[in-house]
Image (spheres, coloured by chain):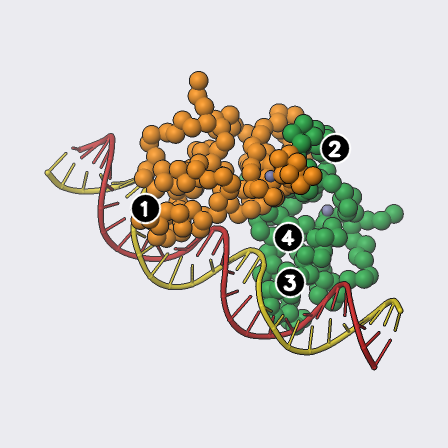
Chain colours: A green, B orange, C yellow, D red
Amino acid sequence: MAHSHDIPTDLTRNQELVLGTLTASMGPLSAYDILDKLRGDGLRAPLQVYRALDKLVDRGLAHRLESLNAFVACADMHCHRKGLIAFAICESCGKVDEFADEVIEERLGSWARTGGFKVERTTMEIRGRCADCLKKAA
Amino acid sequence: MAHSHDIPTDLTRNQELVLGTLTASMGPLSAYDILDKLRGDGLRAPLQVYRALDKLVDRGLAHRLESLNAFVACADMHCHRKGLIAFAICESCGKVDEFADEVIEERLGSWARTGGFKVERTTMEIRGRCADCLKKAA
DNA sequence: GCCGCAAGCGTAATAACATAACATATCGTT
DNA sequence: AACGATATGTTATGTTATTACGCTTGCGGC
Ligand SMILES: [Zn+2]
Ligand SMILES: [Zn+2]
Ligand SMILES: [Zn+2]
Ligand SMILES: [Zn+2]
Protein backbone atom coordinates (compact mmCIF):
# COMPACT_ATOMS: atom_id res chain seq x y z
CA MET A 1 0.00 0.00 0.00
CA ALA A 2 1.22 3.44 -0.91
CA HIS A 3 1.84 5.72 2.00
CA SER A 4 3.10 9.20 2.86
CA HIS A 5 6.71 8.81 2.10
CA ASP A 6 6.85 7.15 -1.27
CA ILE A 7 9.02 9.80 -2.83
CA PRO A 8 9.06 9.74 -6.62
CA THR A 9 12.46 8.90 -8.04
CA ASP A 10 12.36 11.29 -10.95
CA LEU A 11 12.92 14.46 -9.01
CA THR A 12 15.86 16.65 -9.86
CA ARG A 13 18.54 17.27 -7.29
CA ASN A 14 17.11 20.60 -6.18
CA GLN A 15 13.59 19.28 -6.01
CA GLU A 16 14.76 16.36 -3.94
CA LEU A 17 16.66 18.61 -1.55
CA VAL A 18 13.70 20.90 -1.09
CA LEU A 19 11.20 18.11 -0.61
CA GLY A 20 13.56 16.41 1.79
CA THR A 21 13.82 19.56 3.85
CA LEU A 22 10.06 20.00 3.96
CA THR A 23 9.50 16.39 4.88
CA ALA A 24 12.05 16.55 7.67
CA SER A 25 10.55 19.71 9.09
CA MET A 26 8.03 19.76 11.91
CA GLY A 27 6.04 22.62 10.50
CA PRO A 28 5.69 24.84 7.47
CA LEU A 29 8.79 26.51 6.08
CA SER A 30 9.13 29.65 4.04
CA ALA A 31 11.17 29.51 0.86
CA TYR A 32 13.90 31.42 2.64
CA ASP A 33 13.86 29.03 5.59
CA ILE A 34 14.40 26.22 3.12
CA LEU A 35 17.15 28.12 1.39
CA ASP A 36 18.98 28.64 4.67
CA LYS A 37 18.80 24.95 5.47
CA LEU A 38 20.21 24.08 2.06
CA ARG A 39 23.15 26.46 1.86
CA GLY A 40 25.39 23.62 2.91
CA ASP A 41 24.22 21.68 -0.12
CA GLY A 42 25.24 24.44 -2.47
CA LEU A 43 22.02 26.35 -2.91
CA ARG A 44 22.57 30.07 -3.02
CA ALA A 45 19.58 31.87 -4.49
CA PRO A 46 15.88 32.08 -3.65
CA LEU A 47 14.98 31.23 -7.21
CA GLN A 48 16.50 27.79 -6.91
CA VAL A 49 14.12 27.05 -4.10
CA TYR A 50 11.10 28.71 -5.68
CA ARG A 51 11.59 26.77 -8.89
CA ALA A 52 11.75 23.48 -7.07
CA LEU A 53 8.71 24.41 -4.99
CA ASP A 54 6.73 25.23 -8.12
CA LYS A 55 7.26 21.77 -9.48
CA LEU A 56 6.59 20.06 -6.19
CA VAL A 57 3.37 21.98 -5.71
CA ASP A 58 2.31 21.24 -9.30
CA ARG A 59 2.74 17.56 -8.61
CA GLY A 60 0.96 17.69 -5.30
CA LEU A 61 4.05 16.67 -3.36
CA ALA A 62 4.02 19.92 -1.46
CA HIS A 63 1.44 22.55 -0.67
CA ARG A 64 1.61 26.26 -0.34
CA LEU A 65 -0.10 27.78 2.69
CA GLU A 66 -1.31 31.13 1.48
CA SER A 67 -2.06 32.56 4.87
CA LEU A 68 1.50 31.85 5.99
CA ASN A 69 3.50 32.40 2.83
CA ALA A 70 5.01 29.04 3.57
CA PHE A 71 5.12 25.49 2.33
CA VAL A 72 4.59 21.99 3.70
CA ALA A 73 5.26 18.54 2.34
CA CYS A 74 2.05 16.77 1.45
CA ALA A 75 1.04 14.74 4.47
CA ASP A 76 -0.20 11.81 2.47
CA MET A 77 -0.96 10.44 -0.94
CA HIS A 78 -4.65 10.96 -0.39
CA CYS A 79 -4.75 14.30 -2.07
CA HIS A 80 -2.39 14.06 -4.98
CA ARG A 81 -4.20 15.19 -8.09
CA LYS A 82 -7.43 15.58 -6.22
CA GLY A 83 -9.62 18.57 -5.65
CA LEU A 84 -10.09 20.53 -2.52
CA ILE A 85 -7.77 20.21 0.44
CA ALA A 86 -8.19 21.99 3.73
CA PHE A 87 -5.43 22.78 6.18
CA ALA A 88 -5.70 23.26 9.91
CA ILE A 89 -2.75 25.22 11.19
CA CYS A 90 -1.90 25.42 14.88
CA GLU A 91 -0.74 28.88 15.84
CA SER A 92 1.07 27.54 18.88
CA CYS A 93 3.14 24.67 17.59
CA GLY A 94 2.95 25.18 13.85
CA LYS A 95 1.63 21.71 13.17
CA VAL A 96 -0.42 21.45 10.00
CA ASP A 97 -3.20 18.97 9.54
CA GLU A 98 -4.39 18.26 6.04
CA PHE A 99 -7.83 16.94 5.25
CA ALA A 100 -10.42 16.64 2.52
CA ASP A 101 -14.15 16.96 2.89
CA GLU A 102 -16.48 15.88 0.15
CA VAL A 103 -19.45 17.73 1.58
CA ILE A 104 -17.61 21.03 1.54
CA GLU A 105 -16.32 20.33 -1.92
CA GLU A 106 -19.80 19.55 -3.18
CA ARG A 107 -21.19 22.59 -1.46
CA LEU A 108 -18.66 24.87 -3.10
CA GLY A 109 -19.23 23.17 -6.43
CA SER A 110 -22.90 23.80 -6.13
CA TRP A 111 -22.38 27.45 -5.26
CA ALA A 112 -20.14 27.78 -8.30
CA ARG A 113 -22.57 26.06 -10.67
CA THR A 114 -25.37 28.30 -9.49
CA GLY A 115 -23.43 31.43 -10.22
CA GLY A 116 -21.75 30.19 -13.37
CA PHE A 117 -18.33 30.46 -11.76
CA LYS A 118 -15.61 28.15 -13.03
CA VAL A 119 -13.41 27.04 -10.15
CA GLU A 120 -9.73 26.62 -10.87
CA ARG A 121 -8.23 26.41 -7.43
CA THR A 122 -9.45 26.63 -3.88
CA THR A 123 -7.55 27.45 -0.75
CA MET A 124 -8.95 26.73 2.64
CA GLU A 125 -6.97 27.32 5.79
CA ILE A 126 -8.10 27.13 9.36
CA ARG A 127 -6.01 28.84 11.99
CA GLY A 128 -6.32 27.99 15.63
CA ARG A 129 -4.97 25.72 18.38
CA CYS A 130 -4.50 22.01 18.08
CA ALA A 131 -5.68 19.57 20.74
CA ASP A 132 -2.18 18.98 22.08
CA CYS A 133 -1.51 22.66 22.60
CA LEU A 134 -4.89 23.20 24.24
CA LYS A 135 -4.18 20.36 26.62
CA LYS A 136 -0.78 21.78 27.53
CA ALA A 137 -2.26 25.21 28.14
CA ALA A 138 -4.95 23.83 30.44
CA MET B 1 -32.60 48.72 6.39
CA ALA B 2 -28.86 48.66 6.71
CA HIS B 3 -27.01 48.12 3.50
CA SER B 4 -23.50 47.89 2.07
CA HIS B 5 -22.49 51.44 2.34
CA ASP B 6 -23.40 52.48 5.81
CA ILE B 7 -19.95 53.67 6.69
CA PRO B 8 -19.36 54.12 10.40
CA THR B 9 -18.71 57.68 11.38
CA ASP B 10 -16.09 57.02 14.00
CA LEU B 11 -13.29 56.18 11.65
CA THR B 12 -10.09 58.15 11.79
CA ARG B 13 -8.99 60.16 8.81
CA ASN B 14 -6.58 57.50 7.55
CA GLN B 15 -9.06 54.72 8.05
CA GLU B 16 -11.66 56.68 6.16
CA LEU B 17 -9.31 57.36 3.28
CA VAL B 18 -8.29 53.72 3.02
CA LEU B 19 -11.83 52.41 3.24
CA GLY B 20 -12.95 54.97 0.68
CA THR B 21 -10.26 53.84 -1.71
CA LEU B 22 -11.20 50.20 -1.30
CA THR B 23 -14.88 50.92 -1.73
CA ALA B 24 -14.26 52.92 -4.87
CA SER B 25 -12.10 50.24 -6.39
CA MET B 26 -13.37 47.61 -8.79
CA GLY B 27 -11.21 44.86 -7.41
CA PRO B 28 -8.81 44.03 -4.62
CA LEU B 29 -5.96 46.41 -3.92
CA SER B 30 -2.61 45.77 -2.30
CA ALA B 31 -1.55 48.03 0.54
CA TYR B 32 0.91 49.68 -1.81
CA ASP B 33 -1.76 50.22 -4.46
CA ILE B 34 -3.79 51.99 -1.81
CA LEU B 35 -0.82 54.03 -0.73
CA ASP B 36 -0.19 55.19 -4.28
CA LYS B 37 -3.79 56.31 -4.64
CA LEU B 38 -3.56 58.27 -1.40
CA ARG B 39 -0.30 60.13 -1.92
CA GLY B 40 -2.31 63.13 -2.98
CA ASP B 41 -4.03 63.08 0.40
CA GLY B 42 -0.76 63.23 2.23
CA LEU B 43 -0.07 59.59 2.94
CA ARG B 44 3.57 58.73 2.55
CA ALA B 45 4.41 55.46 4.26
CA PRO B 46 3.16 51.87 4.00
CA LEU B 47 2.61 51.74 7.71
CA GLN B 48 -0.05 54.39 7.55
CA VAL B 49 -2.01 52.13 5.23
CA TYR B 50 -1.29 48.91 7.08
CA ARG B 51 -2.40 50.41 10.35
CA ALA B 52 -5.67 51.58 8.89
CA LEU B 53 -6.20 48.21 7.20
CA ASP B 54 -5.66 46.38 10.49
CA LYS B 55 -8.44 48.30 12.14
CA LEU B 56 -10.77 47.99 9.19
CA VAL B 57 -10.21 44.25 8.99
CA ASP B 58 -10.70 43.89 12.75
CA ARG B 59 -14.05 45.60 12.42
CA GLY B 60 -15.07 43.57 9.42
CA LEU B 61 -15.24 46.61 7.16
CA ALA B 62 -12.54 45.19 4.93
CA HIS B 63 -11.15 41.76 4.26
CA ARG B 64 -7.72 40.50 3.49
CA LEU B 65 -7.40 38.08 0.61
CA GLU B 66 -4.54 35.84 1.63
CA SER B 67 -4.01 34.28 -1.75
CA LEU B 68 -3.59 37.70 -3.32
CA ASN B 69 -1.88 39.66 -0.56
CA ALA B 70 -4.55 42.23 -1.16
CA PHE B 71 -7.60 43.77 0.42
CA VAL B 72 -11.23 44.45 -0.44
CA ALA B 73 -13.98 46.47 1.16
CA CYS B 74 -16.60 44.25 2.72
CA ALA B 75 -19.32 43.77 0.15
CA ASP B 76 -22.11 43.91 2.64
CA MET B 77 -23.09 44.04 6.26
CA HIS B 78 -24.01 40.39 6.20
CA CYS B 79 -20.69 39.24 7.49
CA HIS B 80 -19.64 41.83 10.00
CA ARG B 81 -18.71 40.07 13.21
CA LYS B 82 -19.82 36.72 11.87
CA GLY B 83 -17.91 33.55 11.29
CA LEU B 84 -16.77 32.07 8.07
CA ILE B 85 -16.72 34.03 4.84
CA ALA B 86 -15.76 32.64 1.47
CA PHE B 87 -14.44 34.63 -1.46
CA ALA B 88 -14.68 33.81 -5.13
CA ILE B 89 -12.02 35.68 -7.04
CA CYS B 90 -12.12 36.01 -10.82
CA GLU B 91 -8.65 35.71 -12.32
CA SER B 92 -9.74 37.57 -15.43
CA CYS B 93 -11.46 40.67 -14.17
CA GLY B 94 -10.46 40.69 -10.53
CA LYS B 95 -14.02 40.81 -9.28
CA VAL B 96 -14.48 39.35 -5.82
CA ASP B 97 -17.69 37.76 -4.69
CA GLU B 98 -18.22 37.28 -0.99
CA PHE B 99 -20.52 34.67 0.46
CA ALA B 100 -21.29 32.69 3.57
CA ASP B 101 -22.36 29.10 3.76
CA GLU B 102 -23.74 27.62 6.95
CA VAL B 103 -23.30 24.06 5.80
CA ILE B 104 -19.60 24.54 5.21
CA GLU B 105 -19.26 26.35 8.49
CA GLU B 106 -21.01 23.56 10.35
CA ARG B 107 -18.93 20.97 8.55
CA LEU B 108 -15.70 22.65 9.52
CA GLY B 109 -16.95 23.10 13.05
CA SER B 110 -17.71 19.44 13.26
CA TRP B 111 -14.28 18.50 11.93
CA ALA B 112 -12.72 20.78 14.53
CA ARG B 113 -14.79 19.38 17.41
CA THR B 114 -13.88 15.87 16.45
CA GLY B 115 -10.18 16.59 16.52
CA GLY B 116 -10.25 18.94 19.50
CA PHE B 117 -9.05 21.82 17.35
CA LYS B 118 -10.04 25.32 18.43
CA VAL B 119 -10.74 27.45 15.38
CA GLU B 120 -9.74 31.08 15.56
CA ARG B 121 -9.95 32.18 11.96
CA THR B 122 -10.72 30.58 8.63
CA THR B 123 -9.78 31.69 5.18
CA MET B 124 -11.47 30.30 2.14
CA GLU B 125 -10.72 31.58 -1.32
CA ILE B 126 -11.86 30.22 -4.63
CA ARG B 127 -9.93 31.26 -7.72
CA GLY B 128 -11.39 30.90 -11.17
CA ARG B 129 -13.45 32.70 -13.81
CA CYS B 130 -16.66 34.53 -13.20
CA ALA B 131 -19.75 34.05 -15.36
CA ASP B 132 -19.27 37.35 -17.17
CA CYS B 133 -15.72 36.56 -18.17
CA LEU B 134 -16.66 33.08 -19.30
CA LYS B 135 -19.41 34.51 -21.46
CA LYS B 136 -17.05 37.04 -23.04
CA ALA B 137 -14.49 34.34 -23.76
CA ALA B 138 -17.04 32.09 -25.44
C1' DG C 1 -5.98 72.23 35.60
C1' DC C 2 -2.80 68.46 35.37
C1' DC C 3 -1.35 63.74 35.34
C1' DG C 4 -1.26 59.32 33.22
C1' DC C 5 -2.75 56.29 29.90
C1' DA C 6 -4.38 54.54 25.53
C1' DA C 7 -4.85 55.10 20.70
C1' DG C 8 -3.39 57.22 16.73
C1' DC C 9 0.02 59.24 13.77
C1' DG C 10 4.60 60.26 11.04
C1' DT C 11 8.99 58.79 9.52
C1' DA C 12 12.98 56.04 8.54
C1' DA C 13 14.96 51.87 8.20
C1' DT C 14 14.79 47.13 7.45
C1' DA C 15 12.99 42.49 6.98
C1' DA C 16 10.61 39.00 4.42
C1' DC C 17 8.71 37.22 0.27
C1' DA C 18 8.92 36.75 -4.84
C1' DT C 19 10.21 37.43 -9.78
C1' DA C 20 12.72 39.24 -14.14
C1' DA C 21 16.34 38.72 -17.15
C1' DC C 22 20.06 36.43 -18.99
C1' DA C 23 23.53 32.98 -19.68
C1' DT C 24 24.68 27.87 -19.37
C1' DA C 25 23.97 23.17 -18.86
C1' DT C 26 21.78 18.63 -19.29
C1' DC C 27 19.11 15.21 -21.50
C1' DG C 28 16.25 12.66 -24.71
C1' DT C 29 14.99 12.54 -29.67
C1' DT C 30 15.84 12.64 -34.42
C1' DA D 1 25.65 15.97 -34.30
C1' DA D 2 21.66 19.14 -34.11
C1' DC D 3 17.58 20.38 -31.86
C1' DG D 4 14.14 21.44 -28.43
C1' DA D 5 12.60 21.08 -23.89
C1' DT D 6 13.72 21.36 -19.19
C1' DA D 7 16.62 22.50 -15.49
C1' DT D 8 20.22 25.39 -13.52
C1' DG D 9 23.12 29.34 -11.68
C1' DT D 10 23.63 34.20 -10.83
C1' DT D 11 22.59 39.01 -10.36
C1' DA D 12 19.55 42.36 -9.79
C1' DT D 13 15.17 44.05 -8.75
C1' DG D 14 10.38 44.25 -7.34
C1' DT D 15 6.75 43.69 -3.91
C1' DT D 16 4.81 43.06 0.60
C1' DA D 17 5.15 43.76 5.64
C1' DT D 18 7.20 45.04 10.12
C1' DT D 19 10.31 47.16 13.78
C1' DA D 20 11.68 50.99 16.29
C1' DC D 21 11.24 55.48 17.84
C1' DG D 22 9.13 59.67 19.14
C1' DC D 23 5.30 62.96 18.93
C1' DT D 24 0.32 64.10 19.35
C1' DT D 25 -4.43 63.75 20.74
C1' DG D 26 -8.34 62.60 23.52
C1' DC D 27 -10.11 61.21 27.86
C1' DG D 28 -10.95 59.85 32.76
C1' DG D 29 -9.28 60.47 37.56
C1' DC D 30 -7.37 63.51 40.80
ZN1 LIG E 1 -1.51 16.76 0.30
ZN1 LIG F 1 -0.37 22.93 18.43
ZN1 LIG G 1 -17.68 41.08 4.38
ZN1 LIG H 1 -14.43 37.99 -14.30
Q: In 3D space, how far apart are the residues under numbered discs 1 and 2 (Cα atoms)?
A: 49 Å
Chain of the residue where label 4 is placed in the rendered structure: A
Name the residue tied to disc 4: A71
Residues indicated by labels 1 and 4 sit on the same polypeptide chain: no
B119 or C15: nearer the eye? C15
Badge 3 sits on which subunit?
A: A
Figure quadrant of residue B97 = top right
For marks 3 and 2 on the same chain, the one whose residue lies earlier in the sequence: 3
Q: Position of residue A53 (x, y in %)?
A: 67, 58
Q: Which numbered marker is on residue B41?
A: 1
- Chain to which mark 2 belongs: A
Q: Which residue is mark 2?
A: A102
Type of the residue with mark 2: Glu
**Discs 1, 2 touching: Cβ within 8 Å:** no
Residues at discs 1 and 2 both on one chain:
no
Residue at the spot of label 3: A49
